[in-house]
Amino acid sequence: MRKPAAQQLQDYLAGQGLKSTHQRDEILAVFVSAGRHLSVEELYELMKKEHPRIGYATVYRTMKLFAQAGLAEELRFDDGFTRYEYKASDGHHDHLICTRCGRIIEFENDRIEELQESVAKKNRFLAQSHKLEIYGLCGDCRGKRAKKE
Amino acid sequence: MRKPAAQQLQDYLAGQGLKSTHQRDEILAVFVSAGRHLSVEELYELMKKEHPRIGYATVYRTMKLFAQAGLAEELRFDDGFTRYEYKASDGHHDHLICTRCGRIIEFENDRIEELQESVAKKNRFLAQSHKLEIYGLCGDCRGKRAKKE
DNA sequence: ATCATATTGATTTCGATTATCAATATCACC
DNA sequence: GGTGATATTGATAATCGAAATCAATATGAT
Ligand SMILES: [Mn+2]
Ligand SMILES: [Mn+2]
Ligand SMILES: [Zn+2]
Ligand SMILES: [Zn+2]
């Protein structure tokens, strides 16, 4: 089980002495319901449909805020812009990224995580975060590539 | 054993119908002897000492060229700018990155590589490249952090 | 040495993100 | 419910690494 996103936001804002605004509520609702791995641009476009008055800068600022509140994970793949995904659980996962269609597949592998920790230890290194991204072709694109283009 | 960097560059240029220039030779010499993981800015500063006439854009262009020639690996860590490291061997390695002092430690772990491949296979994914970066504190900075600041 | 063409270096442009700032919304306090 | 201090918004400008532009120059095949 998990605290609802809206409640988590209110708690964070209250705890930090920040204000609850319509924009923050609306962005959160759209962000959570939209699915995963949204760029700010994509999220802004989604917002405009329901809330045309929303400002570009507000979406940027608010996503940074959500990341600090633990509501969103900030991702930087190799395509040049920042993406966010809703942190539905406390669990960690990494990503397979299709370089052809942009599809993103998530995976968890405890053994890899353990080995990373052992590598860190071996180098007297205190690991605080990590990024494992595997780039290539997803199943669909693998087939298409063989045929044409 | 390995073909000398200068020779590898000449071969690549010849093969592509490109021209051999003093700038390319000089940048390569400085780049190779400098050590690893240089940002373009850092490399440009090194170049200026021995070759003040070198242009900023030329360093950018030339590093891209070296990457295509297989002489340099292009790295994009989370600090916002591109780095290059000389590809001395054909071997692959990943990185531990100290977020306090910027130190970069290299590691190889065949077991992790295997597990990545098995994750890809399990998802019908054709892996073409990957990026594994572990961020945290190096041995030195771990001690310093405990004391002050 | 000639000449077509690749390269250089100074500079401008680009694009994602951040900073600025006047107008507005929120909320603790009355 | 009003008041007022302060946080937030939205339009816009600034930032900054990287890429594009272009006239001047270097290269190399002939
Ligand atoms: Mn994900
Ligand atoms: Mn390295
Ligand atoms: Zn795909
Ligand atoms: Zn360190």
Image (cartoon, coloured by chain):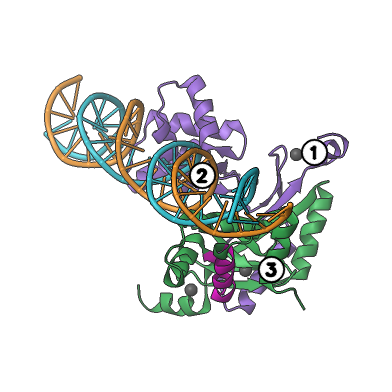
Chain colours: A purple, B green, C cyan, D orange
Q: State the predominant SS element of the stretch in magenta.
A: helix
Q: Secondary structure at mark 1?
A: helix
A62 to B39, vertically: above or below: above
Query: Mark 3 to mark 2: distance in Å?
Result: 33 Å
Q: Are marks 2 and 1 in contact (CB under 8 Å)?
A: no
**Magenta segment includes A27:** no
Which residue range is magenta in the image?
A: B24-38
Question: Element type at marker 3?
Answer: loop
Disc 1 under 8 Å from ligand 3? The reply is yes
List x then y, in percent, for residue D3: 12, 28
Q: Is residue B18 left or right of residue A8?
A: right
Q: Ligand 3 is located in which of the four quadrants?
A: top right
Which amino acid lies under the numbered mark 2 shown in the image of this protein?
Leu
The residue beneath circle 3 is B93
Q: Which residue is mark 2?
A: A71
Q: Is mark 3 within 8 Å of ligand 2?
A: yes
Residue designated by label 1? A141
Label 2 or label 1, whichever lies nearer to me, is 1
Tell me, yes or no, whether dots 1 and 3 are on the same chain: no
Q: Quadrant of the C terminus of chain A?
A: top right
